[in-house]
């Protein structure tokens, strides 16, 4: 079969973050896809954030199922999420990276949540390790239709035009997109989902000087050797405790290494 992958995008200038010596452990989560139809998932997140022993929580994208602008934070469900995140951000280092569903999450929302902006990509140095943190969607090179869509909606002119519409119109469009996405998912199996391109990710890791890659997006959680140099890839779990087989997991890093922690069902 012909190679349908797109070209490897150039490695963007990453943010560099050095964990303070006082940090004992760091949690990584992603793909919560929060919306009002996930009450159990939302409660599980609140329980986790209220009890985690981590000094820092890194949320690597798709915290929300859809985010149509920071004025959305006044909606009832989103306002409750802001309150939860703000309480978390007041007691630990909360960092949020945008994903493919919530790429319009901006500085006003981050400030309301007392959260730090986490650039995609970021190189994190902690516990003697160098890790490349990304959401993961940009390196799914076999999903060319999505990459074209991504290029369109990440264009500042497109975003400016979209955000100029009234909030209710943007919310309606988000609902339509979610319904279309759900119908598309019903026609696919997990084997059909795009994955991060190994050769492209290896090039990015080499450019970053990282020995580990941490990302979400693909909904295929696991840990594996990745690339020709024996680097490790850690794929984060998506969260859904309201439909089908329950899924919710935290990847925790401490001096002793990585640990996967499933949340109570």
Image (cartoon, rainbow, N blue to C red):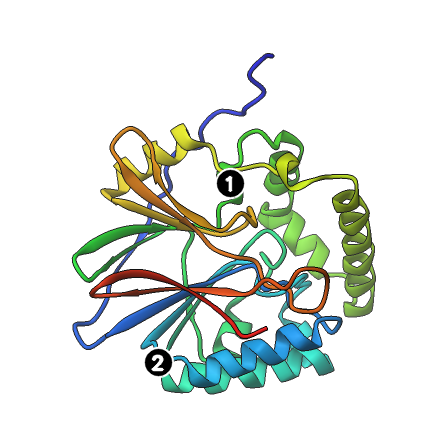
Quadrant in the picture for residue 69: bottom right
Relative to 134, is 19 above or below? Answer: below
Of residue 239 and residue 115, the one placed in the foreground of this image is 239
What is the x, y in percent for residue 118?
Answer: 41, 61
**Mark 2 neighbour density, 10 Å: few (under 14) some (14–19) many (20 or more):** some
Q: Is residue 36 left or right of residue 249?
A: right
Residue under label 1: 138
Residue under label 2: 53
Give the residue at x 55% y 54%: 99
Label 1 vs 2, first from the N-terminus = 2
What is the x, y in percent for residue 232?
Answer: 32, 44
Give the residue at x 45% y 80%: 114
Quadrant holding the C terminus: bottom right
Of residue 164 and residue 90, the one placed in the foreground of this image is 90
What is the x, y in percent for residue 168?
Answer: 82, 69
Q: Secondary structure at mark 2?
A: loop
Quadrant in the picture for residue 106: bottom right
Relative to 242, is 199 above or below? Answer: above
Q: Is residue 32 left or right of residue 76?
A: left
**Mark 1 neighbour density, 10 Å: few (under 14) some (14–19) many (20 or more):** many
Q: Secondary structure at mark 1?
A: helix
Give the residue at x 50% y 69%: 107
Relative to 212, is 7 above or below? Answer: above
Q: Is residue 242 left or right of residue 205?
A: right
What is the x, y in percent for residue 203?
Answer: 33, 32
Relative to 149, is 109 above or below? Answer: below
């Amino acid at each position: 079969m012909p190679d349908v992958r797109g070209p490897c995008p150039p490695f963007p200038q990453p943010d560099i973050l050095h964990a303070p010596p006082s940090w004992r452990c760091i949690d990584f989560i992603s793909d919560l896809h929060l919306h009002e139809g996930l009450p159990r998932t939302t409660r599980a997140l609140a329980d986790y954030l209220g009890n985690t022993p981590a000094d820092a929580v890194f949320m690597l994208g798709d915290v929300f199922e859809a985010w149509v602008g920071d004025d959305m934070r006044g909606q009832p469900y989103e306002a409750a999420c802001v309150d939860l995140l703000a309480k978390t951000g007041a007691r630990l280092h909360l960092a949020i990276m945008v994903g493919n569903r919530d790429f319009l999450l901006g500085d006003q929302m981050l400030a309301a949540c007392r959260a730090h902006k986490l650039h995609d990509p970021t190189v994190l140095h902690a516990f003697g390790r160098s890790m490349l943190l990304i959401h993961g969607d940009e390196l799914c090179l076999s999903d060319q239709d999505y990459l074209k869509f991504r290029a369109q909606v990440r264009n500042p002119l497109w975003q400016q035009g979209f955000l100029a519409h009234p909030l209710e119109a943007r919310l309606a469009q988000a609902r339509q997109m979610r319904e279309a996405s759900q119908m598309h998912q019903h026609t696919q199996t997990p084997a059909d989902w795009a994955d991060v391109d190994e050769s492209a990710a290896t090039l990015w890791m080499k450019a970053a000087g990282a020995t580990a890659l941490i990302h979400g997006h693909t909904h295929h959680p696991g840990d594996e050797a990745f690339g020709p140099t024996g680097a490790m890839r850690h794929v984060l779990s998506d969260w859904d405790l309201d439909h089908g087989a329950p899924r919710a997991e935290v990847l925790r890093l401490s001096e002793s290494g990585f640990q996967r922690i499933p949340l109570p069902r």
